[in-house]
Amino acid sequence: MSLRDEILGVEAPSPRGFTILAPPSWQKFDADDAGRQALEWQLKERFRSIGRPDLEGQSRAMARQQWAKLAEMRAFAVYMPMTPSIEGATPMSMITARWDARGEFESDVRARAGHPVDRVDTEIGTVFRWDHEQTGRGDLGSLQSRQHNFVFPFPVANP
């Protein structure tokens, strides 16, 4: 809030968004049909360029499964690396979703997380964090995934 707004008694604006800083090789995809189609197109081009169009159908099916999960989570975006690293890297993605508190924020996070939650107080506010691991299903049964979850309230009266 500016000094002018304070003097005039103007309320500070509510947060309307966020910024995620990611390496240049990462790309944002909206968690809607257009975002899924954009990802599928890039995967198709990549597999065809390396002479593996057979993997196109598998990657499309996996993307559709993931987008169904994003819809269940009420996610609005997914971020992932799209340019392969020369050094190699651990496959990962970052999902952003809205968390609507049902009652007091911290109690709600702890009740709904399903895992032990750490409270981390930072200079910009409190962050709630928990991790969990899971094994894939079906054809992906040999894969392990680890999820790191972070939830923080927007600085408003009713987060």
Image: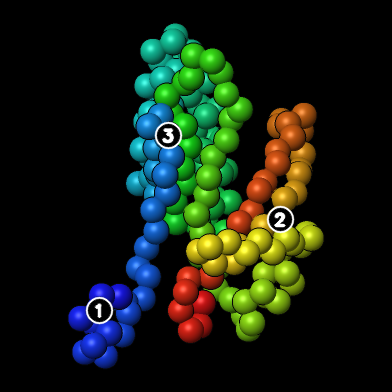
Label 1 neighbour load within 10 Å: few <14, some 14-19, many 20+: few
Give the residue type that dot 3 points to: Pro
Label 2 neighbour load within 10 Å: few <14, some 14-19, many 20+: some
Give the residue type that dot 2 points to: Trp
**Residue underneath mark 3:** 23
- In the image, residue 44 sits, relative to residue 6, either above or below, namely above
Q: Earlier in the sequence, mark 2 or mark 3?
A: 3
Disc 1 versus disc 2: distance between alpha carbons?
39 Å
Where residue 150 sits, quadrant-wise, is bottom right
Disc 2 versus disc 3: distance between alpha carbons?
24 Å
Residue 158 makes an appearance in the image: yes
Say left or right for 56 vs 126: left
Q: Which mark is residue 3?
A: 1
Disc 3 versus disc 1: distance between alpha carbons?
35 Å
For the N terminus, which image quadrant? Answer: bottom left
Report the residue at 66% width, 61% height from top. Answer: 120
- Residue 56 position in % (x across, y down): 48, 24
- In the image, residue 26 sits, relative to residue 47, either above or below, namely below
Of 120 and 42, nearer the camera is: 120
Tell me the SS state at disc 3.
Answer: loop
Q: Which mark is residue 130?
A: 2
Q: Earlier in the sequence, mark 1 or mark 2?
A: 1
Report the residue at 44% width, 9% height from top. Answer: 51
Label 3 neighbour load within 10 Å: few <14, some 14-19, many 20+: few
- Residue 85 position in % (x across, y down): 48, 19
